[in-house]
Amino acid sequence: MRKDVQKHLQSAEMFLKESEHLFSGGFHNGTVGRAYYAMFHAATAALLVKEIERTSHHAIISAFGEFIVKPGLVDGKFHKYIVEAFTLRNDCDYLAPFEADESQAATTLRRAKEFVDACRKLAG
Protein backbone atom coordinates (compact mmCIF):
# COMPACT_ATOMS: atom_id res chain seq x y z
CA MET A 1 0.00 0.00 0.00
CA ARG A 2 1.27 3.47 -0.87
CA LYS A 3 2.53 5.46 2.07
CA ASP A 4 0.20 8.41 1.38
CA VAL A 5 -2.81 6.08 1.18
CA GLN A 6 -1.81 4.48 4.47
CA LYS A 7 -1.34 7.89 6.09
CA HIS A 8 -4.83 9.05 5.08
CA LEU A 9 -6.39 5.82 6.32
CA GLN A 10 -4.59 6.26 9.65
CA SER A 11 -5.93 9.80 9.86
CA ALA A 12 -9.43 8.52 9.13
CA GLU A 13 -9.13 6.01 11.99
CA MET A 14 -7.86 8.69 14.36
CA PHE A 15 -10.76 11.00 13.48
CA LEU A 16 -13.23 8.14 14.05
CA LYS A 17 -11.82 7.57 17.53
CA GLU A 18 -12.01 11.28 18.29
CA SER A 19 -15.59 11.36 17.03
CA GLU A 20 -16.56 8.43 19.26
CA HIS A 21 -14.95 10.11 22.26
CA LEU A 22 -16.76 13.38 21.58
CA PHE A 23 -20.07 11.56 21.14
CA SER A 24 -19.68 9.79 24.48
CA GLY A 25 -19.20 13.20 26.08
CA GLY A 26 -22.29 14.68 24.45
CA PHE A 27 -20.38 16.99 22.11
CA HIS A 28 -22.55 16.57 19.04
CA ASN A 29 -21.04 19.29 16.86
CA GLY A 30 -17.56 17.92 17.50
CA THR A 31 -18.79 14.40 16.77
CA VAL A 32 -20.10 15.51 13.39
CA GLY A 33 -16.94 17.43 12.52
CA ARG A 34 -14.57 14.60 13.34
CA ALA A 35 -16.81 12.02 11.61
CA TYR A 36 -16.78 14.17 8.47
CA TYR A 37 -12.98 14.43 8.56
CA ALA A 38 -12.76 10.65 8.88
CA MET A 39 -14.78 10.38 5.65
CA PHE A 40 -12.70 13.10 3.97
CA HIS A 41 -9.42 11.30 4.66
CA ALA A 42 -10.86 7.90 3.71
CA ALA A 43 -12.17 9.35 0.42
CA THR A 44 -8.76 10.90 -0.23
CA ALA A 45 -7.12 7.50 0.32
CA ALA A 46 -9.58 5.79 -2.04
CA LEU A 47 -8.86 8.37 -4.73
CA LEU A 48 -5.10 8.07 -4.28
CA VAL A 49 -5.38 4.33 -4.88
CA LYS A 50 -6.74 5.28 -8.31
CA GLU A 51 -3.90 7.84 -8.76
CA ILE A 52 -6.37 10.74 -8.44
CA GLU A 53 -5.23 13.70 -6.38
CA ARG A 54 -7.46 16.55 -5.26
CA THR A 55 -6.99 19.09 -2.50
CA SER A 56 -10.22 20.97 -1.73
CA HIS A 57 -13.15 19.47 0.11
CA HIS A 58 -15.49 20.05 -2.83
CA ALA A 59 -13.00 18.50 -5.26
CA ILE A 60 -12.53 15.40 -3.08
CA ILE A 61 -16.29 14.92 -2.70
CA SER A 62 -16.91 15.43 -6.42
CA ALA A 63 -14.06 13.13 -7.50
CA PHE A 64 -15.22 10.47 -5.05
CA GLY A 65 -18.63 10.50 -6.74
CA GLU A 66 -17.16 10.47 -10.23
CA PHE A 67 -14.30 7.98 -9.89
CA ILE A 68 -15.32 5.74 -6.99
CA VAL A 69 -19.14 5.70 -6.84
CA LYS A 70 -20.10 6.15 -10.51
CA PRO A 71 -18.04 3.14 -11.72
CA GLY A 72 -19.62 1.05 -8.94
CA LEU A 73 -16.56 0.57 -6.73
CA VAL A 74 -18.73 1.37 -3.70
CA ASP A 75 -22.46 1.80 -3.15
CA GLY A 76 -23.91 5.18 -4.13
CA LYS A 77 -25.04 5.77 -0.55
CA PHE A 78 -21.46 6.61 0.36
CA HIS A 79 -21.47 9.72 -1.81
CA LYS A 80 -24.68 10.79 -0.10
CA TYR A 81 -23.08 10.15 3.29
CA ILE A 82 -20.08 12.40 2.67
CA VAL A 83 -22.17 15.17 1.07
CA GLU A 84 -24.59 15.21 4.01
CA ALA A 85 -21.76 15.07 6.56
CA PHE A 86 -20.00 17.97 4.82
CA THR A 87 -23.16 20.08 4.89
CA LEU A 88 -23.92 19.27 8.54
CA ARG A 89 -20.29 19.93 9.54
CA ASN A 90 -20.49 23.34 7.87
CA ASP A 91 -23.70 24.09 9.75
CA CYS A 92 -22.10 23.04 13.04
CA ASP A 93 -18.99 25.13 12.42
CA TYR A 94 -20.43 28.25 10.84
CA LEU A 95 -24.11 28.68 11.74
CA ALA A 96 -23.89 29.99 15.28
CA PRO A 97 -25.70 29.09 17.41
CA PHE A 98 -26.31 25.75 15.68
CA GLU A 99 -26.21 22.51 17.63
CA ALA A 100 -26.48 19.09 16.00
CA ASP A 101 -28.78 16.84 17.98
CA GLU A 102 -27.88 13.41 19.33
CA SER A 103 -29.59 11.61 16.45
CA GLN A 104 -27.71 13.62 13.80
CA ALA A 105 -24.41 12.99 15.56
CA ALA A 106 -25.09 9.26 15.99
CA THR A 107 -26.12 8.86 12.34
CA THR A 108 -23.09 10.76 11.05
CA LEU A 109 -20.73 8.70 13.22
CA ARG A 110 -22.33 5.40 12.16
CA ARG A 111 -22.11 6.40 8.50
CA ALA A 112 -18.48 7.49 8.91
CA LYS A 113 -17.57 4.05 10.27
CA GLU A 114 -19.22 2.40 7.25
CA PHE A 115 -17.58 4.86 4.88
CA VAL A 116 -14.07 4.37 6.27
CA ASP A 117 -14.50 0.59 6.19
CA ALA A 118 -15.58 0.67 2.53
CA CYS A 119 -12.62 2.87 1.56
CA ARG A 120 -10.20 0.69 3.53
CA LYS A 121 -11.39 -2.32 1.54
CA LEU A 122 -10.76 -0.45 -1.72
CA ALA A 123 -7.22 0.30 -0.62
CA GLY A 124 -6.49 -3.36 -0.05
Image: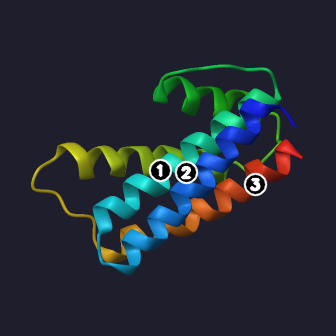
Q: Can the viewer see residue 29 in this picture?
A: yes
Residue at 53% over, 47% down: 82
Q: Quadrant of the N terminus?
A: top right
Q: Is residue 103 left or right of residue 72?
A: left
Note whether 94 is above or below 106 in the view shown: above
Residue at 64% over, 53% down: 77
Colour convention = rainbow
Between the residue at mark 3 and the residue at mark 2, the CA separation in whole angstroms equals 12 Å
Looking at marks 3 and 1 on the same chain, the residue that comes earlier in the sequence is marked by 1
Between the residue at mark 3 and the residue at mark 1, the CA separation in whole angstroms equals 15 Å
Residue at 79% over, 21% down: 51
Number of labelled discs?
3
Looking at marks 3 and 2 on the same chain, the residue that comes earlier in the sequence is marked by 2
Residue 118 % position (x, y): 75, 54
Label 1 Cα crowd, 10 Å radius (few <14 / some 14-19 / many 20+): many
- Whether tag 1 and tag 2 are in contact, CB under 8 A, the answer is yes
Q: Secondary structure at mark 2?
A: helix
For residue 52, what is the image quadrant? top right
Q: Secondary structure at mark 3?
A: helix
Q: Amino acid at mark 2?
A: Ala
Give the residue number, with chain letter if any, for mark 2: 38
Q: Nearer the viewer, residue 111 or 25?
A: 25
Q: Amino acid at mark 1?
A: Tyr
Give the residue number, with chain letter if any, for mark 3: 118
Residue 105 % position (x, y): 39, 68
Give the residue number, with chain letter if any, for mark 1: 36
Q: Secondary structure at mark 1?
A: helix
Q: Is residue 101 left or right of residue 67?
A: left
